[in-house]
Image: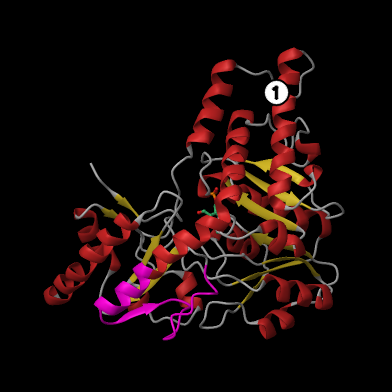
Amino acid sequence: LVTYYLDHAATTPVRSVAIETMTKLLADGLGNPSGAHRLARAATRVLDDARENMADALGAQPGEVVFTAGGTEADNLALFGVLEASGGVAVCSAIEHHAVIDPVEHRGGRVVAVNPDGQIDLEALAEALGADVSIVSVMLANNETGILQPLAAIADLVREHAPNAALHTDAVQAFSWIDLAEVAQVADMISVSAHKFGGPPGVGALVVRAGTPMAAQIRGGGQERGRRSGTQNVPGIAAMVAAATEMVAEREHEVARVGSLRDRLADGLRAQVSGVVESGVGADADRSTKTANVCHVCIENIESEALLFLLEKDDVLASAAASCSSGAMEPSHVLAAMGYSRELAFGSLRLSLGYPSTDDDIDAVLAALPPAVERLRECS
Ligand code: PLP
C-alpha cells in the first residue's frame, strides 16, 4: 500500500542505522552501565561514546548532556529543575509546545505574546523579564507552523533584563534543519527528541550547560550525574545518536533538497486553491523564518478534519496541527496567539516533510488537495 506521509513533524520513520544499532545491542546483550563487570563496562563504553557524539552534534560538552525519555521529559526537567533549584518565575512564549507551556502555567509563570508573523514580541518579552525570573523558555522552531524564533535577540534581552535567568530552548522541531551547535550556543539548556530525527520514540536529551542550577526531578540511583536517575536506555540512546550523526552529516544537503520540495508544495497550493493563508509567510513567499520542512496553511471555509479524511482516502497522511491537539475540537493555541480567527484556525493543515520525502509526495498532495477542497466547499 502506497502512502504519502506528510506528518514528519509528528514523528519521522526510524533510520536504518538506528534500527541496526538498537537491534544489535539488544541482541548482543549489555550489562547495566552502573555496574563494574565486563558487560557493565561494555555498556558504559557505548553510553560514553553516545554522549560524546551527542555533545558534538549539539555543541555541548559531554558532561552537559542529560539523556531523558523524550522531549516532554527534557522540557519538564529544564523548567521544574530550574524552578526547584532557583525559585523565581518562569517565562515562556505563547506558542510553546504543551510540554513547556503547561509547566510554566502550572507554576504561575508569565506567558509572552507573539506577533502575527508568529515570532515573539520582543518588547513584551523585555517587559516580562526582571531579576525575579529564573528561567526563560522559547522554542527554536514551532511544531505546528515551523516558524523560527530569533534566539540570539532573545538571549540578548534575557542577559540584559533577567541576569539571573537560564535560557532554555525547545529545539525538538529544529534539530533536523538547524545547526544547534551554532544557533543554540546562546542557550543554557536545549531539548531534543529522537523520534523527530529518525531515532526511536521515548528517547531524548537535555543539554544543561555547566553552572546552570537544576534540581533532579527523578530521584533514585543517581544516574546522569544525579540529574536524572534510572538505568539508562543504552540501546535507545545509541540508536538516537546514530540517527543524529547521520542526520547532521546530511543536514545541509537535506535543508536544500527538502526546502525546495516544500516550496513547490506551498507555491502549488497557493496557486491552485483560493483562500490559502500560509502561516508566517506573506505575499512575497519569503519562507526564511521557517524550517525547511513545514508547509502550514489555513484554508478559508474549510474544516481541516473533513479535509484530512478526504486526503487519507487518497493515501495522503497529514495533520491539522500538533498531533496531540488534532482530534480535539479546540483551535490551536499557537494560531490563536498569532491572532487567527477561530473559523480560519479550524481550516489549519500541516504538511510536514522529512528525510524520506520525495517529489512523489508533493505530486500526490497537489493532485488530491485542490479537488478535495472544492468538494468540501460545494457541500457546505
Ligand atoms: N516539543 C516540541 C516542539 C515537540 O514538537 C514535541 C513533540 O511532539 C515535544 C516537545 C515532545 O517530545 P516527545 O514526543 O519526545 O515527548
Identify which residue is drawn at 58% across, 33% down: 236
Q: Give left or right: position of 249 versus 348.
A: right
Which residue: 52% across, 38% down? 200
Callout 1 secondary element: helix
Crowd rating for badge 1 (residues with CA inside 10 Å; few <14, some 14–19, many 20+): many
The reply to whether residue 228 is visible in this rendering is no
Picture coordinates of residue 3 (x, y %)? Answer: 27, 48
Residue 165 can be seen in this image: yes
State which quadrant residue 226 falls in. Answer: top right
When the figure is inspected, residue 170 is found, relative to residue 345, above or below; the finding is above
Check disc 1 and report the residue beneath it.
Answer: 43
Q: Is residue 331 above or below residue 205?
A: below
Residue 311 covered by magenta stretch: no
In the picture, measured across the screen, residue 375 lies left or right of residue 298, that is left
Q: Nearer the viewer, residue 128 or 149?
A: 149
Residue at image point 53% right, 77% down: 118
- Residue displayed at 82% across by 54% down: 85
Please report the bounds of the magenta region as a residue range: 264-290
Name the foreground residue: 180 vs 342.
180
